[in-house]
Amino acid sequence: MAELKIHDDRSNGRLEAFEDDTFVGVVVYFVLDAEPHALVAVHTVVEEGHEGKGIAGALVREFYAIAAGEGVPVVPLCPYAAKWAERHPDEAPVPASDVVRAAKLQLKATPDLW
């Protein structure tokens, strides 16, 4: 596998992965408006032909690292991110239930977020 580069496109809610200059995967997310703010993962996709290389895991790991650096929780509404969090509890703290509830409400009110 070529070197994986991950870029946070916050304005578009996309954490993108590239091998060389080729787009290979993304975590689609939004920032929770309500306090406390959180990063909310809603979708993880790896491009066809790049599956099985650990790209999705690298993206989700970086997503949690970014949130930790900002001092905010992650709400993993994306099924892949949720499973990854279950398998990596040392890297993926469980968010408070009120934060999860607020994230679900914001997503329901604004379905175009994903």
Image: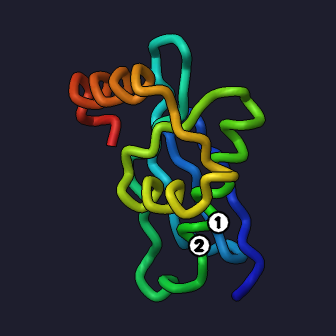
Which quadrant of the figure has residue 111? top left
Residue 48: % across, % down: 41, 82
Residue 6: % across, % down: 69, 59
Kindly state the secondary structure of the residue where label 1 is placed: helix
The answer to which of 107 and 12 lies nearer the viewer is 107
Picture quarter with the N terminus:
bottom right
Residue 7: % across, % down: 68, 53
Rendered residue at 45%/48% (across/down): 28
- Identify the residue position indicated by label 1 in the image: 58
- Identify the residue position indicated by label 2 in the image: 55
Residue 63 visible in this rendered orientation of the protein = no
Picture quarter with the C terminus:
top left
Kindly state the secondary structure of the residue where label 2 is placed: helix
**Residue found farthest to the top:** 35
User: Could you tell me if the residues under marks 2 and 1 are in contact, i.e. CB atoms within 8 Å?
Assistant: yes
Residue 5: % across, % down: 73, 65
Say few, some or many: other residues with alpha carbon within 10 Å of mark 1 (under 14 / 14 to 19 / 20 or more).
Answer: some
